[in-house]
Amino acid sequence: MSSNSIGNILKTLRKERKLTLKELAEQTDVSISFLSQVERGKSSVTLESLKKIADALKVNPTVFFPENSQSDNLEERRQQFYYQDLSNGNRDASYLPILVTLQPGENEGNAFSHAGHEFLFVIEGTLTVVVDEKKEILVEQQSIMFDANKIHYWYNLTDQPVRFLVVSSKVR
């Protein structure tokens, strides 16, 4: 999915909620100019920023990656990361399952925190996870669960894609 598509979806959601760029920037601690650049397809968004934006808009981050995207799509492969919603449309659950694919070298972004808990399970590849400055390297079939209020981030520091399941508890 191209940065421009994410930007179009972001702009539509923001306008539906009658939010200005300034209001969204204040809610996300992301600059107005950055949000504007993302909306215009002039800047790509990090995992950290996308999560903050999705939380502020009260949407699942997977909304930025429509269902009809195919994993062998060249546009998608260029994206540093890709989210696939595994909830089967169930929006009432107290947790949110997402399949994440990080491309090789995905190490941009800053650690962040959010309410709830997070469970990660590596399906393919090697994932580096940092929680409260403690680094863990997870390989296929390994998992970790932590309090998402702790500062955390995921990285793919390898030369191969990594696919992992993220299950986050929802804040009601």
Image (cartoon, rainbow, N blue to C red):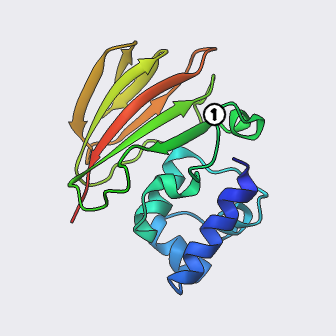
* Tag 1 residue: 71
Q: Is residue 96 left or right of residue 79?
A: left
The answer to whether 3 is drawn above or below residue 9 in the figure is: above
Q: Amino acid at mark 1?
A: Ser
Q: Residue at x 29, y 45 (%)?
A: 168
Q: Nearer the viewer, residue 32 or 63?
A: 63
> Looking at the image, is 92 positioned above or below residue 47?
below
Q: Quadrant of residue 37?
A: bottom right
> 98 or 79: which is nearer to us?
98
Q: If the image is split into quadrants, where does the C terminus sit?
A: bottom left
- Residue at image x 43%, y 68%? 56
Q: Position of residue 118 (x, y in %)?
A: 27, 40
Residue 79 occupies which quadrant of the picture? top right
Front-most of residues 113 and 53:
53
Q: Secondary structure at mark 1?
A: loop
* Residue beneath the point at 24% across and 62% down: 92
Residue 53 on image: x %, y %: 50, 62
Image height check: is 42 above or below 47? below
> 10 Å neighbourhood of mark 1: few (<14), some, or many (≥20)?
few
- Indicate the position of residue 74 as horizontal and vertical percent values: 77, 34
